[in-house]
Image (cartoon, rainbow, N blue to C red):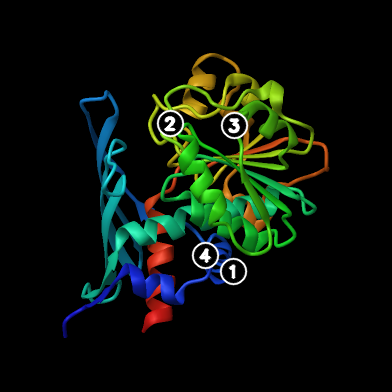
Amino acid sequence: MQPAYISADAIAGRLNFTGLIEHLRQAHRFSPPAVERVLMQHKSASGAENGFLIWPAWQHERNLGIKICTLFPDNRSLPAVQALYVLFDGLDGSIQALIDGTELTYWKTAADSALGADYLARKDAKTLLMVGAGNLAPFLIKAYQSIRPDLERVLVWNRTAHKAQVLAQNVRDAACAQAVSDLGEAVKCADIVCCATTSYSPLINGSWLSPGTHVDLIGGYTPCMREADDETVRRSRLFVDSRLFTVEHVGDLTQPIANGVIQRSDIEGDLFDLCTGRCAARRSDSEITLFKSGGGAHLDLMTAQHIQSLLN
């Protein structure tokens, strides 16, 4: 029997963030699948790091899968992330599905961040600031709207102002959206600051953060990349989606650890801890929380399982 190919259109037509976020919440209450990480990077003409990622995960006796992915930040006519996911049966090793890995990655990444924010952002959050207007940004906004349906404003900042304007014009679900040019002022009035960029130097200054802000850092996936400065990290309670894919790999943590600003022990928990109640989530309306997303093969597998269950 030939395995099914699950296209981006099929995923978009059936998936919703409410169901996916809840699936990830339940999946994080069990032990993580065994995972590996292989990342080869080469400099592009602009100096950006192109990546080739091979991410397998194995949940014994249920499923195993692998994502094959390229990351080319300088792409303009093509997505920066292009991928294919292969899902196997965990009992007999047969191929169950070939899934559009780019679409899977967008949904997985956005749901991952929104799940963290569901524990860490204030329940009465009204203003979301989206920093970055790439292909992932619309998914992130929709995911945040699914966990905080009372959001009243979505602010969008991007280095290229036109892209921020286009994204703001396409925001739906009752929120008032607008492009902004002053990043510092936007951060000061935001309840949630969500960053999805490929920046190599900090964009978010910790002195801008108001009490009660939740900061979500997504874009940096190498030790050289950075979206927030040392002061942001110092002022925040720190959480990650998975210790395995963040603590030793992403600049928003490795650099302040190397500089002595924080220690590894300052990272209070990951999604496995939050979803099982092993660590405290938000404790007050005044504390600043920070969630660093590193992605991870386990999240790809969890999302592929959910997609297959919907489309079978």
Residue occupying the far left of the picture: 1
Q: Which type of secondary structure does the marked residue at label 3 adopt?
A: loop
Where is residue 245? Give x, y as percent. Answer: 43, 41
Is 20 or 94 nearer to us in this picture?
Answer: 20
The quadrant in which residue 5 appears is: bottom left
Q: Do the residues labelled 3 and 2 touch (CB within 8 Å)?
A: no
Chain-order first, disc 1 or disc 2: 1
Chain-order first, disc 2 or disc 4: 4
Is residue 272 visible to the viewer in this orientation of the structure? no
Which circle marks residue 181 in the picture? 3
Is 134 or 267 nearer to us in this picture?
Answer: 134
Amino acid marked by disc 3: Ser
Around disc 2, counting alpha carbons within 10 Å, would you say few (fewer than 14), some (14 to 19), or many (20 or more)?
some
Name the residue that disc number 4 marks: 27
Distance Cα–Cα, label 4 vs label 3? 39 Å
Amino acid marked by disc 2: Glu
Q: Do the residues labelled 3 and 1 touch (CB within 8 Å)?
A: no
Chain-order first, disc 4 or disc 1: 1
Q: Which residue is drawn at 75% across and 50% down?
A: 126
Name the residue that disc number 1 marks: 18
Distance Cα–Cα, label 3 vs label 1? 31 Å
Q: Compared to 199, does 256 lie above or below?
A: above
Q: Nearer the viewer, mark 4 or mark 1?
A: 1
Is residue 29 visible to the viewer in this orientation of the structure? yes
Q: Are marks 1 and 2 in contact (CB under 8 Å)?
A: no
Q: Which type of secondary structure does the marked residue at label 2 adopt?
A: loop
